[in-house]
Image (cartoon, helix red, strand yellow):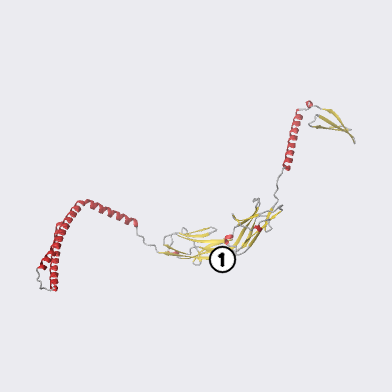
Amino acid sequence: MFRGPDTIIFQRKIFPESVCEINIYKGSQKEKRLAKEVSFSELSRSDLNSLKMAWKTSGLMQMCRFLLLVILFLPHEMTSSVLTVNGKTENYILDTELGFEESLKCAVQNHTREEELLWYRGEGRVDLKSGNKINSSSVCVTSISENDNGITFTCKLQKNQSVSISVVLNVTFPPLLSGNDLQTAEEGNDVKLVCNVKSNPQAQMTWYKDGSILNLEKDHHQIQQTSEYLQLSITKVKKSDNGTYSCTAITFTERKTKDFHLIVKDKAVTIPIEPIVAACIVVFLTLCFGLLARRKRIMKMRKLRCHLIRQEFYIRTSLIYEVPSVFIAIIKFIPVKLSEVMKKQFIMHLAVVAMTNLIYLQNTFRKKAVKNEK
């Protein structure tokens, strides 16, 4: 730019053309004319670099504009449908109580055609009637219990299940306590009293003994608490641990208590099994070694006993066969005139005499056998 007293001259370069225009303004009158042409060869090196950068920038901008127009005019589908549950467009928590009945109504907003709806309870799909699916659908939760707490109900579009809305049930109920209320333990054993609890909101739990707050002894009592149970562990119970333990749950509305009775018995005298088994094994092995050491003497005694038994058997069998023959011979010589009664008495007398002799012989052989063994 050049300044003079009467004129102001503005010089402007126009790219990519290789001409320069000189605009001359005199006073208030404006005249425009072409002053001269300037070739690229007359430009400085910095001007040439500026020309190249301007050309590249201009080409890049034109390409960006073209791509933007192409993207804008590409065919695409926009999902404008919106789901609502009980008039709410976002996921929410539904507060309720035990025994209540809740109705959930899902509806499609801004839809351009008929839309089928799906309901899910947790991960399971809810069966809907044919007239309760199109554009609007309702489910009813009756007789709400503590098991319904935290259950999620989700409504989805059938054609595009990414479009959904969920409702979480928040069931308020008083503490429910359970557990094994009677335990018996021997003195010196470990005991665990477990108080199961279900509550919403979560209850404040405390252990009592015989109506007073339990005094916890180090290395003797230990308490563990979760959202589902309160556990009292007693290490090496003593007689003084006998009593009634109460598990107390307190919420801002209610207080519930459950009693646990602990009975500590005297320590039973246990018979040591291991020493008894070891002693039996030692006795058995001793007998085995003794029998092996005296096996020759035992075999000799056995042979002698068998010989004596065999002799006694021969004697008895001979007597058995001889005595009846004697009886028969004697009976033959009995006079016929004797009555039958007298014959029977005579035979009985002979039988007694014979048996007496047999007993005497048996005792005699036994005495001999005992002497031989000695």
Q: Position of residue 196 (x, y in %)?
A: 52, 61
Q: Amino acid at mark 1?
A: Arg
Q: Residue at x 16, y 59 (%)?
A: 313
Q: Which residue is mark 1?
A: 255
Q: Residue at x 34, y 57 (%)?
A: 273
**Left/right of residue 316 with respect to residue 246 in the rendered view:** left
143 vs 344, nearest the viewer:
344
Q: Position of residue 239 (x, y in %)?
A: 43, 64
357 vs 98, nearest the viewer:
357
Residue 202 visible in the shown view: no
Q: Would you identify the image quadrant in which residue 263 lies?
A: bottom left
75 vs 63, nearest the viewer:
75
Residue 291 visible in the shown view: yes
Query: Residue placed farthest to the front in the image?
Result: 336
Q: Residue at x 32, y 57 (%)?
A: 276
Q: Is residue 15 above or below residue 261?
A: above
